Amino acid sequence: VTDTDTLERTEEQQDTRLSSSLETPWRTVVWNDPVNLMSYVSYVFRSYFGFTREKADRLMLQVHTEGKAIVASGGREEMERHVQAMHGYGLWATLDRVES
Amino acid sequence: MAFKRGADGAIALKLSGAERSLLHGLETDLDGQLAAGSGDAELPRSLDRLFPDAYPDDAEASAEFRRFTETELVDHKRRNAATVLRALDTPGRRAIPITDEEAQGWLRSLTDLRLTLASRLGIEEDGDEGRMSWLDPNRQVYMWLGYLQETLVRAIEA
């Protein structure tokens, strides 16, 4: 693999990411509730989304202190799948369109 | 009186006889409420918190989301309750072995129980449970379920 190849591939990846973010302005939001344990919420973020402990804890604390956190963004169908999964875990999740 | 991952690597649940029958009753009740909403029937309002609106500002889209997801979600939740009930029906008074796969059902069903109990107790915001009487048996059950779940999260990750 040469440097040029890598550069081109990186540009391709960026293009894909850019176009998908333009076509898919949806996001999954998890809201604070007084019932779910902090350890459980962090565990769900790690096991379902594959987040690191650091990222999962940061988002969990954001839910706790700010009332909500955006945990994913992308296509509408994908976000609906995430919301359904979160409801399966008993988390209070919604989806909405990213404000442009 | 909790979940623990033993030296053999397996998760086990130790409960007293009274705790076992209490949990059995709660899960049976939860499953009955979920069953009441299967098919075309509306889910009981007591389960509202288990099936929140997916679109906070769009009632129509939320209803559409429900049409496509609710049956499957009810089914999952009933299967989780069945997993718990099956374990609690294990004969004998020894610790109940729980596989890691079953533990996932336990995690979710304990959450469903706590959410329905919290609705009944009027726990709607952080700190609400602190305002209730320590002597309220429902509050004690709610706190106990939280403790159980905390030990389960720890055991799963141990």
Image (cartoon, rainbow, N blue to C red):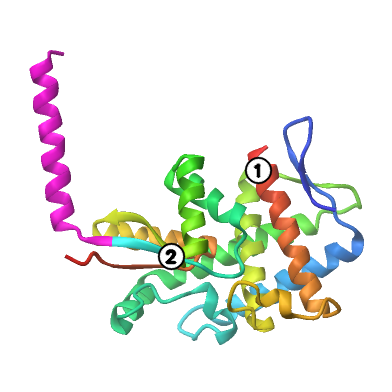
Question: Under tag 2, what secondary structure?
Answer: strand
Tell me where residue B2 appears, x and y as whole percent.
Answer: 80, 52
Crowd tier of the residue under label 2, counting other residues whose Cα lies within 10 Å: few below 14, some 14–19, many 20 or above? some
Tell me where residue A48 appears, x and y as whole percent.
Answer: 46, 48
Asked if residue A3 is among those painted magenta in the image, a careful observer would answer: yes
Q: To which residue does mark 2 refer?
A: A68
Judge left or right: residue B32 versus residue B138: left
Q: Is residue B99 visible?
A: no
Tell me where residue B126 appears, x and y as whole percent.
Answer: 60, 72
What residue type is disc 2 on? Answer: Lys
Q: Is residue A58 visible?
A: yes
Q: Is residue B16 above or below residue B142?
A: above
Q: Residue at x 36, y 71 (%)?
A: B68
**Are both tags, 1 and 2, on one chain?**
no
Q: Residue at x 58, y 76 (%)?
A: B125
Judge left or right: residue B31 versus residue A65: right
- Magenta extent: A1-26
Tell me where residue A38 appears, x and y as whole percent.
Answer: 59, 56
Q: Residue at x 45, y 59 (%)?
A: A85
The image quadrant that residue B134 belongs to is: bottom right
- Asked whether A82 or A8 is in front, the reply is A8
The image quadrant that residue B21 belongs to is: bottom right
- Asked whether A12 or B132 is in front, the reply is B132
Q: Which mark is residue B156?
A: 1
Q: Marks 1 and 2, Cα distance to the nearest angstrom? A: 26 Å
Q: Chain of mark 1?
A: B
Q: Which mark is residue A74?
A: none
What residue type is disc 1 on? Answer: Ile
- Asked whether B95 or B40 is in front, the reply is B95
Q: Main structural element of the magenta stretch: helix, strand or loop?
A: helix
Question: Under tag 1, what secondary structure?
Answer: helix
